[in-house]
Image: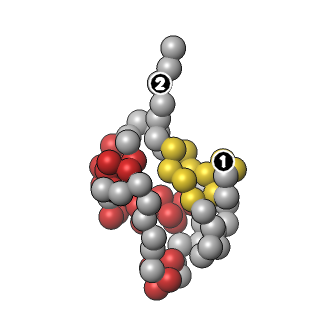
Amino acid sequence: MAGDIVGSPTISLPASEMAGINNVAALKAYLYKHYPKLGELSSMAIAVNKSYANEDTSLDPMDEIALIPPVSGG
C-alpha cells in the first residue's frame, strides 16, 4: 500500500535532503509533506535495519528503512 502511494517499492533520498532527517519523527514529517496520502493511513509503523523503530530512533544515511502500513487479518 505504501509503495502504491509513493509510486515505487523503494525510494532513495539525496544526501542533501537527508541532512535534516536525523530521526524517525523527522522522516515521517518529510514523508507526509512529500507524500500526503501516507498521512491518510490509519497507522504506519517504521522499521530501521529490520527492527521496529519509535519516533526517537536515530537515523544514519545508510540505514534501511521500511514503511509498514496497517494490516488486517482474521
Q: Residues within 10 Å of mark 1 (few under 14, many from 20)?
A: some
The image position of residue 61, as x and y in percent, is: 60, 76
Kindly state the secondary structure of the residue where label 2 is placed.
loop
Kind of residue at badge 2: Ser
Q: Quadrant of the N terminus?
A: top left
The residue that mark 1 highlights is 52
How many numbered circles are shown? Answer: 2
Q: Residue furthest front?
A: 9
Q: Are marks 1 and 2 in contact (CB under 8 Å)?
A: no
Can residue 54 be seen here? The reply is no
Instruction: Report the front residue among 52 and 62.
Output: 62
Numbered badge on residue 72? 2
Instruction: Report the front residue among 52 and 25.
Output: 52
Residue 7 quadrant:
bottom left
Closer to the chain start, of discs 1 and 2, is 1
Image height of 35 relative to 17, above or below: above
Kind of residue at badge 1: Tyr
Can residue 31 be seen here? The reply is yes
Q: CA distance from mark 1 to mark 2?
A: 18 Å
The image position of residue 56, as x and y in percent, is: 65, 59
Question: What's the residue at 51%, 77% (across, down)?
Answer: 18
The image position of residue 54, as x and y in percent, is: 64, 51
The image position of residue 26, as x and y in percent, is: 52, 65
Question: What's the residue at 38%, 50% (across, down)?
Answer: 3
